[in-house]
């Protein structure tokens, strides 16, 4: 299983801590292709020590997708460490940036939806006000109809 997802043609950083934090050592990284063959495009990489810390750094740039492997060790072959790197068309950082962009777009849409909701609420309030006016007019019409009905009714004799 690979440590992370790395992108094709982007540098992969290598790190190595020498046993006992030994300083002044020569640390080699051998790079292997996804097909497990040693990469002839990459001669063995000599890592550079950071200060006198016993920590060594280097890098390589994978040029194909797949599971790459680096075998890091001291020049005498001791202290061997194997690291695997999953290389694809994207890396974790670029996926994170894309997701961040999607979240930004979603936030913008939510703001617009909120604005539309506010306008719908305003229209609903106006409809309620118009309904109240229509009810008032209906009541007046009903009152007029009663008056007209009372005028249409002939007087009754006793």
Image: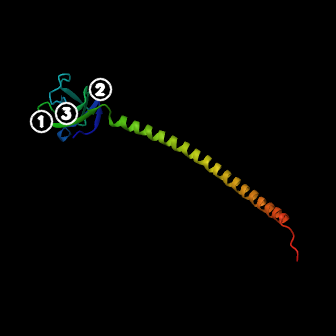
> Residue 1: percent from the left, percent from the top?
21, 41
Q: Please tell me whether residue 53 is drawn above or below residue 146 in the rendered image.
A: above
Labels 2 and 1 touching (C-beta < 8 A) = no
Lower position in the chain sequence, tag 2 or tag 1 = 2
Please tell me which residue is depicted at 38% across the width and 38% down the height of the picture. Answer: 96
> Residue 47: percent from the left, percent from the top?
22, 29
Q: CA distance from mark 3 to mark 1?
A: 18 Å
Does dot 3 land on a helix, a strand or a loop?
strand
- Nearer to me, 84 or 154: 154
> Residue 147: percent from the left, percent from the top?
83, 63
Please tell me which residue is depicted at 25% across the width and 37% down the height of the picture. Answer: 53
Query: Label 2, on which residue?
Result: 9
Quadrant in the picture for residue 97: top left
Please tell me which residue is depicted at 18% across the width and 32% down the height of the picture. Answer: 25
Does dot 1 land on a helix, a strand or a loop?
loop
Query: Label 1, on which residue?
Result: 78
Q: CA distance from mark 3 to mark 2?
A: 15 Å
Give the class, few, some or many, for how many residues have Cα within 10 Å of label 2's Cα (few <14, many ≥20): some
Evaluate whether residue 68 shows in this view.
yes
Q: Please tell me whether residue 157 is drawn above or below residue 28 in the rendered image.
A: below
Quadrant in the picture for residue 49: top left
Instruction: Identify the disc placed on residue 97.
Output: none
Q: Please name the colour scheme applied to the rendered image.
A: rainbow
Give the class, few, some or many, for how many residues have Cα within 10 Å of label 1's Cα (few <14, many ≥20): few
Q: CA distance from mark 2 to mark 1?
A: 30 Å
Lower position in the chain sequence, tag 3 or tag 1 = 3
Q: Please tell me whether residue 107 is drawn above or below residue 67 in the rendered image.
A: below
In the rendered image, the residue lying farthest to the front is: 157
> Residue 115: percent from the left, percent from the top?
58, 45
Query: Label 3, on which residue?
Result: 69
């Amino acid at each position: 299983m690979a440590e992370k997802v790395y992108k094709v043609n982007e540098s992969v950083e290598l790190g190595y801590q020498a046993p006992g934090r030994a300083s002044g050592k020569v640390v080699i990284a051998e790079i292997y292709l996804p097909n497990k063959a040693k990469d002839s495009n990459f001669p063995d990489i000599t890592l550079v020590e950071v200060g006198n810390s016993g920590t060594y750094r280097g890098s390589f740039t994978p040029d194909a997708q797949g599971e790459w492997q680096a075998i890091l060790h001291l020049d005498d072959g001791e202290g061997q460490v194997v690291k695997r790197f999953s290389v694809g068309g994207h890396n974790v950082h670029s996926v994170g940036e894309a997701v961040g962009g999607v979240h930004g777009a979603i936030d913008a849409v939510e703001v617009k939806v909120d604005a539309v909701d506010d306008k719908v609420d305003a229209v609903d309030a106006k409809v309620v006000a118009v309904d109240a006016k229509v009810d008032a007019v209906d009541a007046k019409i009903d009152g007029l109809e009663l008056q007209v009905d009372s005028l249409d009714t002939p007087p009754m004799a006793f």
